[in-house]
Image (cartoon, coloured by chain):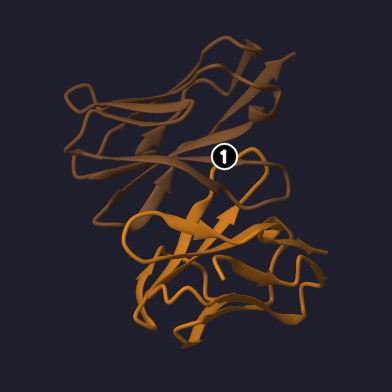
Chain colours: A orange, B brown
């Protein structure tokens, strides 16, 4: 298995909702990442987990809460989001050089 | 702070010709550089990479050149094919942590 799987592929949520994005990899990669990509912009790093511990938080608002339950799973919990948080959320993993990206979750906040 | 810059938002090339995509960076601590290809509604797909100790890496039709003194790298695709049409992101990392992306260049290869 050489893939990073993200679910759901699409998500529409209201500003008062609580939802979670999920990411899974079975390549034994020990680093996992969340990126946010707005239309016609590059992916922007949000969080880095290394060996299941949060190592980088790029000053992301607290309405985004990451969680790494084990070495294969990475979640992003969403609460009280704003319409401007609508974007493609990408998960990636790495071990050594190069990252493997998932296909992303297209999030729309209404 | 845009540490990785791709100043050309788009590039159009005729099939069979060479495509040259450029990328500049500002952080001299970057030690690993990558090119990703991205189709709409998909995650970036790794294309080719180069370590800072090298100045060239070749893989089939794709060659990446690194000029450390100029903090510049480029991706050459030759010959270009219509299937190469996509957005290409340049990326750089320090010790494989927190990879930073350029804004991307949309390549269109015309038949």
Query: Left of B56 or right of it: where is B46?
Result: right
Count of number-bearing discs: 1
How far from the left and from the top, in percent, is residue B18? 52, 12
Which residue corresponds to mark 1? Answer: B37
Judge by depth and name the residue closer to the eye, B38 or B26. Answer: B38
Residue A42 lies, with reference to residue A89, above or below; the image says: above
Give coordinates of residue B11: x percent, y percent. Answer: 60, 17
Percent coordinates x, y for residue A8 in the rendering = 75, 72
Residue under the image location 72 percent in, 80 percent down:
A19
**Chain under numbered label 1:** B
The picture places residue A86, in percent across and down from the top left corner, at 71, 58
Closer to the camera, B104 or A29? A29
Direction from residue A88 to residue A54 in the image, left or right: left
Farthest front residue? B60
Name the quadrant containing residue A47: bottom left
- Helix, strand or loop status at disc 1: strand
**In the depicted structure, whether residue B86 falls above or below residue B108:** below
Q: Residues within 10 Å of mark 1 (few under 14, many from 20)?
A: many
Residue B90 figure quarter: top left
Does residue B51 appear left or right of residue A79 in this picture? Answer: left
The quarter of the picture where the C terminus of chain B appears is: top right
**Quadrant, the N terminus of chain B:** top left
Residue at screen point 50% across, 82% down? A72
């Amino acid at each position: 298995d050489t893939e990073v799987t993200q679910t759901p592929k699409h998500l529409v949520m209201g500003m008062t909702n609580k939802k979670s994005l999920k990411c899974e990899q079975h390549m034994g990669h020990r680093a996992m990442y969340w990126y946010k990509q707005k239309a016609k912009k590059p992916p922007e790093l949000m969080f880095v987990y290394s060996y299941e511990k949060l190592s980088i938080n790029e000053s992301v608002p607290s309405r985004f809460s990451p969680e790494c339950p084990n070495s294969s799973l990475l979640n992003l919990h969403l609460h009280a989001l704003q319409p401007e948080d609508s974007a493609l959320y990408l998960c990636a993993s790495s071990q050594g050089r190069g990252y493997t990206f998932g296909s992303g979750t297209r999030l729309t906040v209404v | 702070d845009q540490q990785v810059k791709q100043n050309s938002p788009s590039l159009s090339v005729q099939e069979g010709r060479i495509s040259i995509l450029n990328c500049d960076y500002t952080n001299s601590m970057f030690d690993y550089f990558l090119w990703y290809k991205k189709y709409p509604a998909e995650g970036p797909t790794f294309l080719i990479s180069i370590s800072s100790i090298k100045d060239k890496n070749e893989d089939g039709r794709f060659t990446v050149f690194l000029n450390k003194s100029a903090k510049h790298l480029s991706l050459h695709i030759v010959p270009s094919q219509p299937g190469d049409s996509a957005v290409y992101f340049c990326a750089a990392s320090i010790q494989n942590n927190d990879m930073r992306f350029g804004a991307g260049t949309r390549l269109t290869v015309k038949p």
